[in-house]
Image (tube, helix red, strand yellow):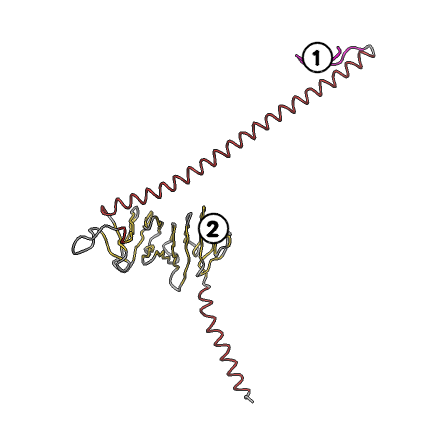
């Protein structure tokens, strides 16, 4: 029979093993942030509701809508339409793994570090700046735009900073221009383990313009759809108002006819009693039999 001392030791070991086994589960459940608002979005296949808490490992999908996620007390990310992204968190930062679509990020200077990652390419707000930027995927290319502050694009090569008001594009090597003999294309920095090129300046101007034009066309299409919906709603409202006016006119005519009938009935009673008619029909109306 085991002694009480050995039983206690075995019990402690079992508890410790259980705690060690639980560590990965707890780590995988680290809180990413909370949903500030959403429309036509799901997480793990379930409808995404405001104030939903997001955890490391969660996958979020936006269809024809958007989702706003609060990271900490100051930073926000907005996932646009047709976007798929998942989240990871370690002790240092939150990583947004972008599968498709676009992400806009507002990062406070002292906010939680954020990394947006597409394959081997990472986009991070430069610390010390209040940053507003966008990372968009379109036709196999990635457009990085800094609207405020500065974004840094990192890979397996030299990092490139994107200053306020600037846009660069990351193009897969299959879509990039061929290298001149003996080196990389002029104006390009090689990143991502040799499978992508970062294009900037004149070399990438045509590609950037084409991608931005595609984004603009997509947004214009959205605006046109919204305008059409608004016009349809306005037409429906006008039709409803017209029907209401017609109903009111009909009710007024019915009320006038009823009042005339009552007045005529009073006239008939007065005539039978040899009295003067107390009621005079309105212009254009008469009492039957008088």
User: Label 2 crowding class (10 Å Cα cut-off): few <14, some 14-19, many 20+?
Assistant: many
Q: Residue at x 47, y 33 (%)?
A: 231
How far from the left and from the top, in percent, is residue 19?
48, 73
**Position of residue 65 measured from the top left corner of the image (x, y, whole percent):** 45, 46
Q: Nearer the viewer, residue 83 or 23?
A: 83
Query: Which residue is pictured at 49% across the width and 74% down the height?
Result: 18
Taking the magenta stretch, the answer to whether it contains residue 157 is no
Q: Name the residue carrying label 1.
A: 286
- To which residue does mark 2 refer? 41
What x and y, as percent, mark residue 145?
32, 48
Residue 103 visible? The answer is no
Q: Quadrant of the N terminus?
A: bottom right
Q: How many marks?
A: 2
Q: Is residue 240 left or right of residue 65?
A: right
In the image, residue 205 above or below residue 118: above
Element type where label 1 sits in the image: loop
Whole-percent x and y of residue 87? 42, 58
Residues at discs 2 and 1 in contact (Cβ within 8 Å): no
Q: Is residue 233 left or right of residue 133?
A: right
Among all residues in the image, which is located at the extreme left?
181
Write down the region rendered in magenta: 275-290
For label 1, the crowd category at 10 Å Cα-Cα, with few meaning under 14, some 14 to 19 and many 20 or more, is few
Quadrant (top left/top right/bottom left/bottom right) for the C terminus:
top right
Residue at disc 2, secondary structure: strand
Q: Would residue 70 be found to the left or right of residue 274 on screen?
A: left
Residue 252 visible (yes or no): yes
Q: Is residue 48 above or below residue 282?
A: below
Instruction: State yes or no: residue 283 in magenta.
Output: yes
């Amino acid at each position: 029979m085991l002694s009480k001392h050995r039983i206690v030791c075995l019990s402690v070991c079992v508890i410790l093993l259980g705690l060690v086994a639980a560590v990965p589960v707890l780590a995988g459940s680290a809180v990413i942030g909370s949903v500030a608002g959403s429309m036509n979005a799901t997480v793990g296949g379930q409808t995404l509701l405001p104030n939903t808490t997001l955890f490391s490992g969660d996958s979020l999908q936006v269809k024809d809508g958007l989702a706003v996620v609060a990271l900490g007390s100051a930073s926000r990310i907005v996932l646009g339409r047709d976007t798929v992204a998942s989240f990871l968190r370690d002790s240092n930062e939150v990583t947004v793994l972008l599968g498709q679509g676009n992400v806009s990020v507002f990062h406070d200077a002292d906010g939680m570090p954020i990394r947006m990652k597409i394959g081997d390419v990472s986009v991070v707000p430069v610390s010390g700046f209040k940053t507003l930027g966008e990372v968009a995927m379109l036709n196999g290319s990635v457009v990085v735009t800094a609207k405020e502050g500065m974004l840094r694009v990192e890979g397996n090569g030299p990092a490139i900073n994107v200053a306020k008001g600037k846009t660069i594009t990351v193009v897969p090597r299959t879509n990039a221009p061929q290298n001149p003999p003996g080196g990389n294309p002029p104006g390009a920095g090689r990143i991502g383990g040799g499978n992508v090129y970062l294009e900037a300046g004149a070399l990438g101007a045509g590609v950037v313009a084409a991608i931005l034009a595609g984004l603009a066309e997509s947004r214009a299409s959205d605006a046109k759809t919204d305008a059409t919906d608004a016009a349809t709603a306005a037409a429906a409202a006008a039709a409803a108002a017209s029907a209401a006016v017609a109903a009111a006119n009909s009710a007024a005519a019915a009320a006038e006819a009823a009042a005339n009938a009552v007045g005529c009935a009073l006239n008939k009673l007065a005539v039978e009693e040899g009295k003067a008619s107390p009621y005079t029909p309105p212009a254009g109306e008469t009492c039957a039999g008088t």
